Image (cartoon, helix red, strand yellow):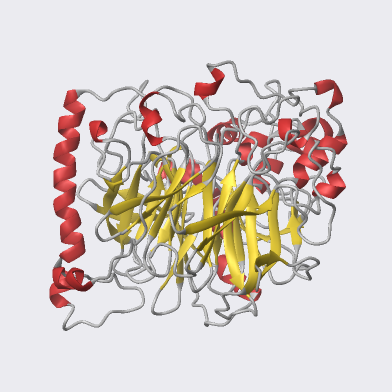
């Protein structure tokens, strides 16, 4: 999940007037989408599993209230997690905690790379709950599976990383950083005393940047992924920058590789073809956030030019089998995957939706060619190898088209620089450029409604919109210099359809910038999840450069809110500690237990930097000491367990 570093510019009066007119136009269409012809025909036409649920005005009169808790105020530089009245929040699983019967976390950061391999990784992100036994709705026993997106080397090592003490940057440090990435699987059980992590556990495992992973689909075995270490192009070492995730209906876990470009270095003197250089530039491969290439030369693309092509995929594995080998599913395209959500059609084919989290990037959809038979099992992952990838074009009139990214169709030909389908998938961004998809505002999380099957996509922000010659606002991205972000709603008649209706579900921010939020204000929507009752949970990611300062001061620390998708009513449910992002949420089937991830607490907000606060390896807890608050402590990304005091349904 990216970072922003520039200050907010005030929109001028003309922009406000134009935006007001646009909102009025879109509102009328929103009403048509919600109450349109379908509601008139509802009495005579049966609903299918992949049809848009139609809700008429009479239904709204008897709809029970979704949100039953009292909203909480914003939190300004409070180094605690605060949850709504009547709820209990407790730290459950922190960076460095053993996943099974491994070594304990050492507060002085002296754990070795081998020990980190047995512990929770850093920077918890998306999370899923899998009931046990497999396929059940058990709400008292299951697996928690979560991503670890990236690391903070100043916290991970006693003397910091490659930029803090380059003379001490060893292979051991590189391995520890790689082992702090990836995925954790832990077993959890509700006992009489409350929820516990089962240790030891037959299910517990870590997947890291060193784990052997298969590659499948059209790109497997092609020239784009063959390397010196893997001349057949069949096995990739590791997964990294695991941002959000997805959960297949057959019980597997999908982890998404996001900003993989930040791990590779491209020396300027390297000699390569113009096509290769264009591809690296389009994917932002130039400088590394880490120094892995010093000790692991596969991250130097001048030495291993295909290595970067081996990242940026959706990775599938079976969380129930700790010996199962993960697989990178290339038919779903290579880009900065934020997450993946799905809908199932009446004919049992499945559509998977994913956003490319970068400015002016795209929203994608993958449709399986074959149906799912309704049974559980990782073997159904073959459906993710055989399908069609599409990219969205949002038209000005509120309709849209899913454009196929298929070699030989339209501009995706050899004459236009594409050699085959593998080329199209490896360079999905360039293929989307070629078919003229709509460039969006950092498309991040996608979630689908369990009843209506409507699709919601968060657009976190894009302060470059309309600036310095960049594309200006359009109907789907209705604000120039979009500092606050918005959420798009997509409605399909059928989940396998290539046409759709869309609307701006909400404009985030404040009234001065014409926010359309009905209730508690927020900025930079990121994580999204609609639970089985239909509550839309929205998590925010205001960057440290903006938190609690300027126009963003009114939003306080990052937060999680609950939204009624029908009325738009919005209530603040949770606020996080200093510097953190709220990201990742999952619930038990009975909706009485929730887990939420708190990422990178202790990242120093700009407002504190201006007061002289500077985090170093010697002062790791200068901005935040959450959650342990020990004198010699350091901030630790954590999974938080939330329950209702009366044992009821969360949010009710």
Q: Nearer the viewer, residue 361 or 92?
A: 92
Q: Which residue is located at x 73 percent, y 54 percent?
A: 233
Q: Which residue is located at x 69 percent, y 65 percent?
A: 196
- In the rendered image, the vertical position of residue 297 relative to residue 105, given as above or below: above
Q: Is residue 522 left or right of residue 275?
A: left
Q: Is residue 199 left or right of residue 50?
A: right
- Image quadrant assignment for residue 154: top right
- Image quadrant assignment for residue 174: top right
Q: Nearer the viewer, residue 250 or 636?
A: 636
Rendered location of residue 59, percent (x, y): 19, 72
Rendered location of residue 303, percent (x, y): 77, 33
Q: Which residue is located at x 47 percent, y 37 percent?
A: 557
Q: Is residue 40 left or right of residue 412?
A: left
Q: Nearer the viewer, residue 543 or 37?
A: 543
Total labels: the figure holds 0
Query: In this orientation, does residue 426 appear?
Result: no
Viewport quadrant of the C terminus: bottom left
Query: In this orientation, does residue 405 appear?
Result: yes
Rendered location of residue 395, percent (x, y): 26, 48
Rendered location of residue 268, percent (x, y): 67, 21
Q: Nearer the viewer, residue 442 or 522?
A: 522
């Amino acid at each position: 999940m990216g970072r922003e570093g520039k200050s907010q510019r005030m929109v001028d009066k003309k922009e406000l007037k134009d935006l007001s007119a646009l909102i009025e136009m879109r509102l009328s269409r929103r009403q048509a989408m919600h109450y349109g012809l379908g509601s008139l025909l509802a009495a005579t036409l049966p609903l299918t599993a992949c049809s848009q649920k139609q809700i008429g005005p009479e239904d709204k009169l008897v709809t029970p209230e979704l949100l039953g808790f009292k909203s909480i105020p914003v939190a300004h530089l409070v180094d605690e997690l605060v949850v709504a009245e009547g709820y209990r929040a407790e730290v459950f699983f922190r960076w460095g905690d053993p996943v099974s019967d491994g070594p304990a976390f050492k507060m002085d950061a002296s754990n070795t790379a081998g020990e980190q391999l047995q512990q929770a990784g850093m920077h918890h992100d998306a999370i899923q709950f899998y009931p046990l036994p497999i396929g059940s709705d058990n709400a008292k026993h299951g697996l928690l599976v979560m991503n670890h997106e990236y690391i903070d080397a100043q916290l991970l090592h006693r003397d910091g990383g490659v930029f803090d003490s380059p003379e001490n940057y060893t292979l051991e440090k590189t391995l520890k950083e790689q082992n702090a990435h990836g995925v954790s699987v832990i077993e959890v059980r509700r006992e009489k005393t409350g929820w516990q992590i089962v240790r030891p556990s037959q299910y517990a495992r870590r997947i890291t940047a060193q784990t052997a992973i298969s590659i499948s689909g059209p790109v497997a075995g092609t020239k784009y992924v063959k390397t010196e270490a893997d001349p057949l192009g069949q096995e990739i070492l590791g997964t990294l920058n695991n941002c959000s995730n997805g959960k297949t209906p057959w019980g597997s876990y999908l982890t998404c590789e996001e900003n993989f470009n930040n791990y590779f270095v491209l020396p300027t003197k390297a000699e390569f073809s113009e096509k290769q250089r264009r591809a690296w530039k389009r994917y932002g491969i130039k400088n590394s956030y880490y120094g892995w290439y010093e000790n692991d030369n596969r991250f130097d693309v001048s030495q291993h030019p295909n290595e970067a092509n081996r990242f940026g995929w959706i990775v599938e594995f079976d969380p129930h089998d700790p010996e199962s080998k993960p697989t990178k599913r290339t038919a779903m395209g290579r880009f900065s995957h934020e997450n993946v959500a799905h809908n199932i059609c009446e004919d049992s084919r499945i559509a998977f939706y994913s956003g490319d989290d970068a400015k002016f990037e795209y929203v994608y959809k993958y449709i399986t060619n074959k149906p799912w038979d309704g049974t559980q099992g990782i073997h159904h992952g073959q459906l993710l190898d055989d399908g069609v990838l599409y990219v969205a074009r949002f038209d000005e009139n509120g309709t849209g088209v899913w454009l196929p990214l298929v070699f030989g169709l339209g501009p995706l030909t050899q004459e236009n620089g594409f050699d085959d389908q593998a080329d199209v998938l490896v360079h999905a961004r360039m293929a989307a450029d070629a078919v003229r998809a709509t460039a969006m505002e950092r498309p991040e999380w996608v979630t689908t409604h369990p009843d209506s099957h409507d699709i919601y996509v968060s657009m976190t922000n894009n302060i470059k919109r309309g600036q310095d010659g960049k594309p200006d606002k359009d109907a789907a991205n209705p604000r120039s210099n979009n500092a606050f972000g918005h959420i798009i709603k997509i409605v399909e008649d059928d989940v396998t359809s290539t046409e759709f209706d869309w609307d701006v579900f909400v404009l985030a921010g404040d009234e001065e910038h014409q926010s359309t939020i009905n209730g508690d204000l927020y900025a930079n929507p990121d994580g999204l999840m609609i639970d089985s009752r239909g509550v839309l949970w929205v998590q925010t990611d205001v960057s440290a450069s903006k938190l609690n300062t300027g126009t963003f001061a009114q939003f306080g620390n990052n937060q999680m809110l609950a939204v009624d998708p029908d009325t738009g009513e919005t209530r603040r449910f949770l606020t996080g500690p200093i510097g953190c992002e709220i990201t990742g949420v999952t619930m038990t089937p009975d909706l009485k237990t929730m887990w939420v991830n708190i990422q990178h607490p202790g990242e120093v907000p700009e407002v504190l930097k201006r007061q002289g606060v500077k985090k170093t390896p010697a002062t790791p807890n200068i901005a935040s000491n959450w959650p342990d608050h020990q004198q010699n402590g350091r901030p630790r990304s954590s999974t938080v367990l939330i329950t209702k005091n009366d044992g009821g349904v969360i949010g009710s």
